[in-house]
Image: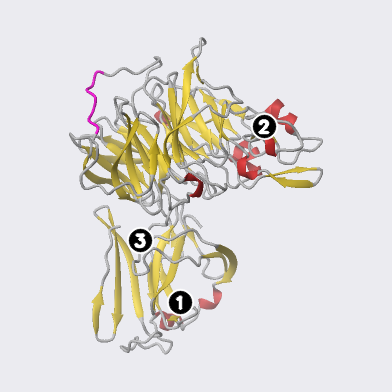
Amino acid sequence: MTYNPLTVVWANGNDVVVSSRMAFGYFTPPPYEDAEYTILPGTVVNDTHYSVTALCRGCTYWAPYGNDPTSLDPNGENYLAFASSGVPVGDPAANDTTFGIHERVGHWVHNFQPAQTIDFDSWAEGNDDGESPTSTVTKTTLLTTFSTSTLHSTTILKTTVTMAGVSPSSATATVSSSHSTSTSSSIVSSAPVPPVPSSCSGVSAFRFGYQTASGWKAVKLAGSLTGPRGLVVDSEGNLLVVQSGKGVTAHTLGADGCISSTKTLFSNPSLNHGIGLTPDGKTLYVSSMTTAWSYAYDAKAQSVSAQTVVVKGMQQGGHPTRNLIIPPATPHLLVIQQGSYSNFDYESLNKAVARAVVKVFDTRSVPSGGYTYASQGWLLGWGLRNEVALAVDGNNAIWGVENSGDDFARTINGQSYDIHNDNPAEELNFLGDPSQANDQWYGYPTCFSVWEPSVIKDKSFKVGQQFVVAPNSTYNDDTCTQRSVPPRLSIQAHSAPIGAVFDGTFQNLYVTLHGSWNRSPATGFKVSVVPFTKLTSGEYDPVAAADCKTGYTDVFWSTNVGSCTGSTCFRPSGIVFDKVFSRLFVASDNTAEGELFMLVKS
């Protein structure tokens, strides 16, 4: 249902609230400003149910945020969908409230032709006899108009209620790393070590319980953010944050190390994760599910200009994140990942589909209107289910950390048994030099990696070996060994890695493990570190062997991880170092409260 107008309704006492939204990813759909609703007769609430009859202006033609226009056929059948949940919304009185994931979904085909009638205008007036609505306040003559507009980069929701003898009332609610890297073994900076606060005045306490590893300290820098995801630090040391469904915000750090000011850099509700800066700090890149844009960026003024579409036509639907990274030694290259459309996206075996891939685009020669993702650029690996976390090592080579599959069973001779709780593993993959095409296949959607060998009863495996869910005579586990690139290191199944960054010496890769719904007890909800070393060949590589389960350790984690959900624990997302690699910034996009943290070695 992404990139389509959503009519979200719920009961609030004896009234019905109608909220105009549009979804762009796995976060609460933000207000959609181009639709206006009028509640018509037939809207009613009672003790057991509610029903809504409404007119929507702006729901039959739309072209959001760089996408091609979409329209419904007024003279024929249209494919529509619904979703519902029995869980109450966060605040029933607030038009811009948050709400949880749906519990039920369905589709139907609706014929719009019967609406082509001379009576339509009278219906739209709110009275079936064609007269103006009466001034009597009843459940069937309540006329309510909802509109959404954007003003000074702040989303304003205005609800006007017209009823007998009452003045219109209104409710308003306001709703990696960018450092310069060479191919040397470490980054040395003569800049002074920036301050580390013990706490920040005016910032609320940590929303959820946490622990840090020995020698580490966590400080909360900000709360009440909207789905904070990707992070970068600009040339002035400002922290830029993608807030899902909102846009990009700039946060200035004061002399005490706390945030001294915050501003909206620009609004774009379709942004959901990806953000990057060129090493000179002058070009900013961001991405939505379908489009990547560039901006000229002024760090001193904290302003952008010259918006340009760099890449277009990415898949609308499926895994929504399109993370991106700019390799510092090749700043003209833009690396963008695109995940699969579903758990098992078999169409992605056709490379031309360009799903479950990482691709590279040369920004020195962007065609008019932008590159088309599927047919242009070059591959940096395929068969990568959802390689959200991307990082660059000291050789300017790309590493990816993959979200693997859900709900797995192993099928042997037609008999299936469950292996999903601890398989398949999340993967740390080496993708290589972004200036050179990498046509290697990493296994998806056929070959997956083992995390817990003991639950696979029909065959003996080691950690990190690849398997197929239903081996047969033509394609089996041995086929994976012959054709697929296995992970360099494996991570606990369902940890959901979505952010990664190397330290200044490239001896440690820090990874945010967002946490998943698909394991009991839950796992993830933490920041972990993978020790790296530089080999005699000059390449960087994890210290641990590929079949090791202890190749990473935890730095910052939820205290009650086994019972964590998307709203009961912090959910680390974006991660980036400051300019001198002394402070590690981490975002949490928990639906109850988005937060920003600083992690430092104490």
Q: Is disc 3 placed on a helix, strand or loop?
A: loop
Which residue lies under the disc numbered 3?
A: 33
Judge whether 338 appears above or below 102 on screen. Answer: above
| Pick the front one: 468 or 568 | 568
Q: Residues within 10 Å of mark 2 (few under 14, many from 20)?
A: many
Residue range highlighted in magenta: 190-196
The quarter of the picture where residue 93 lies is: bottom left
Q: Residues within 10 Å of mark 1 (few under 14, many from 20)?
A: some
Q: Residue furthest left?
A: 255
Instruction: For the residues labelled 2 and 1, say whether their Cβ atoms are less than 8 Å apart.
Output: no
The residue under label 1 is which amino acid type?
Val
The disc placed on residue 52 is 1
| Pick the front one: 200 or 44 | 200
Where residue 44 sits: x, y (%)?
44, 81
The residue under label 3 is which amino acid type?
Glu
Instruction: For the residues labelled 1 and 3, say whether their Cβ atoms are less than 8 Å apart.
Output: no
Where residue 272 sits: x, y (%)?
42, 46
Q: Residue furthest top?
A: 536
The residue under label 2 is which amino acid type?
Gln
Where residue 273 sits: x, y (%)?
41, 43
